[in-house]
Image (cartoon, rainbow, N blue to C red):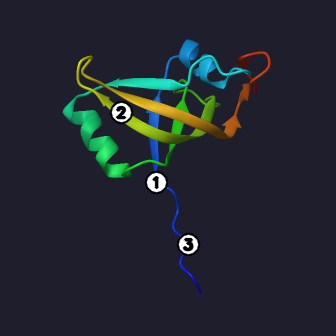
Amino acid sequence: MAKRYSTPTLVINIKREFFAAILAVPKRKSIEYRDMSKYWITRLERVGKPPFNLRLLNGMTPPVPEATMRVTKVVKNKRANRFEIHLGEVLKVKYWNRKKECPTK
């Protein structure tokens, strides 16, 4: 029997306005930015090179709107001192209405 390897997933919290822009139809935001800190360097090294999954969470109290997306590439922008995480296909959405751009229960 062949081994099945799962795609590594990075989980991050994101503000509502950016969450809505990423999941809008059509998409208004296709790049997520993170500071080039030791914290983010370690987290990105842990998931490895793209493609990998990115799980976006909006909030802490259940039911939390969430989306899982495919990351196509990560660019180190040394001039701006931040990572540019390029978002691809939306794989899964929970507790979020993409047309109305608001949470569902």
Left or right: 85 in relation to 80 = right
Taking the view exactly as shown, the residue that stands out farthest to the bottom is 1
Residue pointed to by mark 2: 75
Q: Residue at x 27, y 17 (%)?
A: 80
- Location of residue 102 by image quarter: top right
Residue pointed to by mark 1: 8
Q: Residue at x 69, y 36 (%)?
A: 93
In three-dimensional space, the C-alpha distance between marks 3 and 2, rounded to whole angstroms, equals: 28 Å
Q: Nearer the viewer, residue 66 or 49?
A: 49
Disc on the earlier residue, 2 or 1: 1
Quadrant where the C terminus is found in the figure: top right
Quadrant where the N terminus is found in the figure: bottom right
Q: Nearer the viewer, residue 37 or 59?
A: 37
Label ID, residue 4: 3
Left or right: 27 in relation to 105 = left
Q: Position of residue 31 (x, y in %)?
A: 49, 25
Residue type beneath disc 2: Val
Q: Position of residue 50 (x, y in %)?
A: 44, 47
In three-dimensional space, the C-alpha distance between marks 3 and 1, rounded to whole angstroms, equals: 12 Å
- Location of residue 103 by image quarter: top right
- Badge 1 element: loop
- Badge 3 element: loop
Q: Nearer the viewer, residue 87 or 104?
A: 87
Residue type beneath disc 1: Pro
Q: Position of residue 20 (x, y in %)?
A: 63, 18
